[in-house]
């Protein structure tokens, strides 16, 4: 029997919400999101329902009736997993799939198996990324306790793969051992990096103005960690074996500290660094170089694009990643850590924007009684910026910019129907957004005339639009 519905506990925020929106909603199956505290903007889609739940005296209230073969996803903190299973599992029909999303797997498997009592299909699922990633494509998800012959397990693996996830299968014990290094070690080093900066009272902004690529990426990932859910990272640092691994980090740091110190000769320091690379193969080192070069190259592309924008004065769109605010205008100066930006928009009372992209726009808006005055310039931090791709910039302009609307008069013939002007002509004149047929009149002697209301992009002269439309009308009249 195929999976009938999906229920995500803890799906209103964080990684649970990410899976609702990026993985489960696109299946088309009915998805129900449960959480004890719903945000103002819960996940929304025709096949997604949100319900607020409560836990009282070991019982759960607010849940819907579960159909057989439902998929139950537990995106709850590991500290709440036992109480959730104790309250929820008695309500589930036999045969349901239950998957947890904890960052460890041995303990959750044992808890779920205890309360499932053999009635439910239990599966461990660990996404090795956070809810800030933009797409599931290329993201790794580890499944533990996977039984390929179980259709419910296979459904989960296939669903993840269809959305572009890379699925890995591990025993719970091996997963937890690997995570000590992949998560505990990595996060501890990033936290230590941040703590050193804080203790020495250095300004991150000042240091980033003289950054090297390694410092930039360490700062970026440390900041990403600090800006995320501290409870998640605190739980990871409390995993079984984490304390021993942190002790190993301190021992390794002390050993390197002594071997790199000034009391040792330079050869000892060089040897201490070189011997660390000996266990790695040449291929592994080459792969690391390739990955780091690609990361540095992606940042360099942004620098190159900003340099070109400043050199050409091309109108562009910059988005602040921390607030999602979009600025449309011109980059004037590019510095080490910021850009001087000249904003070219003026907001209108109806919420749309007048956009000064060239001299023609200023003339068109002036005819509409809109003046720009002195253009505003201000600085934006580069590390907070995203450059809108051309397609996205044009979409923003189409959706937000105040267009020019004028009545025009062109030579015409009575045999051309209003639909010709309104449906056909806008497709042939790219800068025309819309045309509305007003009237046709035929003088006693002379060529017929059509009055049209044209809506066009502000950077194009209305006279140019009239000439294009008139030429097309004449051509169509001749062909008719």
Image: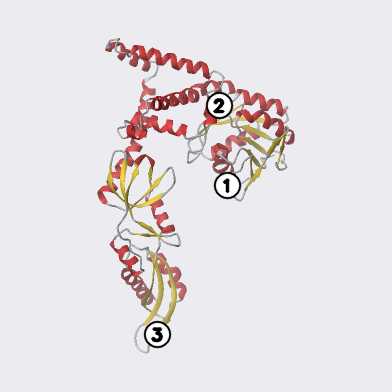
Q: Position of residue 72 (x, y in %)?
A: 65, 36
Quarter assignment of residue 8: top right
Q: Position of residue 57 (x, y in %)?
A: 73, 33
Asked which secondary structure carries label 2, the reply is helix
Relative to residue 190, is residue 360 drawn left or right? left
Inter-mark Cα distance, 3 to 2:
81 Å
Against 147, residue 445 (above or below) is: below
| Residue 148 visible from this viewpoint | no
Q: Position of residue 273 (x, y in %)?
A: 34, 16
**Residue named by callout 2:** 235
Q: Position of residue 304 (x, y in %)?
A: 29, 42
Relative to residue 310, is residue 190 drawn left or right? right
Relative to residue 373, is residue 52 drawn left or right? right
Camera-side mark, 3 or 2: 2
Residue lying furthest bottom: 444
**Looking at the image, do the residues carrying marks 1 and 3 touch, with CB atoms under 8 Å apart?**
no
Against 430, residue 124 (above or below) is: above
Quarter assignment of residue 87: top right
| Residue 161 visible from this viewpoint | yes
**Residue named by callout 3:** 442
**Residue named by callout 1:** 40
Categorize mark 2 by other alpha carbons within 10 Å: few (<14), some (14-19), many (20+). Answer: some
> Reading the chain from its start, which is encountered first: label 2 or label 1?
1
Categorize mark 1 by other alpha carbons within 10 Å: few (<14), some (14-19), many (20+). Answer: few
Name which residue lies at 59% across and 25% down.
105
**Looking at the image, do the residues carrying marks 2 and 1 touch, with CB atoms under 8 Å apart?**
no
**Looking at the image, do the residues carrying marks 3 and 2 touch, with CB atoms under 8 Å apart?**
no
> Reading the chain from its start, which is encountered first: label 3 or label 2?
2
């Amino acid at each position: 029997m195929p999976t009938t519905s999906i229920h995500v506990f803890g799906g209103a925020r964080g990684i649970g919400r990410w899976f609702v929106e990026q993985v489960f909603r696109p299946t088309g199956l009915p998805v129900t999101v449960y959480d004890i505290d719903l945000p103002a903007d819960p996940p929304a889609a025709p096949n997604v329902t949100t319900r607020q739940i409560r836990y009282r005296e070991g019982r759960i209230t607010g849940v819907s009736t579960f159909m057989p073969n439902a998929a139950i996803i537990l995106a709850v903190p590991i500290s709440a997993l036992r109480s959730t299973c104790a309250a929820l599992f008695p309500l589930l029909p036999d045969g349901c799939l239950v998957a947890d999303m904890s960052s460890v797997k041995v303990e959750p498997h044992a808890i779920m198996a205890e309360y499932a009592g053999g009635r439910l299909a239990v599966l461990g699922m660990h996404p090795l990324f956070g809810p800030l990633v933009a797409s599931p494509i290329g993201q790794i998800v580890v499944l533990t306790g996977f039984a390929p012959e179980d259709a419910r397990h296979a459904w989960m693996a296939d669903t993840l793969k269809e959305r572009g996830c890379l699925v890995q299968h591990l025993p719970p014990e091996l997963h937890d051992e690997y995570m000590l290094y992949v998560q505990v070690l990595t996060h501890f080093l990033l936290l230590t990096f941040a703590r050193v900066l804080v203790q020495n009272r250095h300004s991150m902004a000042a240091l980033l103005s003289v950054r090297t690529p390694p410092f930039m990426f360490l700062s970026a990932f440390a900041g990403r960690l600090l800006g995320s859910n501290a409870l998640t990272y605190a739980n990871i640092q409390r995993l079984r074996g984490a304390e021993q691994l942190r002790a190993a980090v301190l021992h390794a740091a002390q050993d390197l500290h002594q071997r790199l110190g000034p009391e040792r000769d330079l050869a000892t320091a060089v040897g201490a660094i070189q011997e660390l690379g000996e266990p790695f193969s040449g291929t592994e080192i080459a792969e690391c170089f390739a990955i780091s070069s690609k990361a540095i190259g992606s940042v360099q592309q942004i620098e190159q694009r900003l340099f070109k924008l400043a050199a050409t004065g091309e109108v562009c769109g910059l988005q602040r990643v921390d607030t999602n605010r979009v600025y449309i205008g011109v980059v004037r100066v590019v510095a080490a850590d910021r850009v001087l930006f000249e904003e070219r928009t003026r907001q209108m009372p109806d919420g749309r924007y007048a956009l000064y992209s060239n001299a023609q726009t200023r003339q068109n808006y002036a005819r509409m009684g809109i003046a720009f005055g002195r253009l505003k310039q201000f600085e934006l931090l580069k590390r907070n910026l995203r450059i809108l791709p051309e397609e996205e910039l044009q979409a923003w302009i189409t959706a937000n910019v105040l267009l020019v609307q004028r009545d025009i008069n062109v030579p015409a013939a009575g045999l051309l129907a209003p639909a010709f002007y309104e449906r056909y002509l806008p497709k042939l004149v790219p800068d025309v957004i819309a045309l509305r047929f007003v009237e046709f009149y035929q003088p006693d002697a002379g060529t017929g005339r059509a009055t049209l209301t044209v809506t066009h992009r502000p950077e194009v002269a209305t006279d140019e639009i009239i000439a294009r439309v008139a030429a097309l009308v004449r051509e169509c009249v001749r062909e008719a």
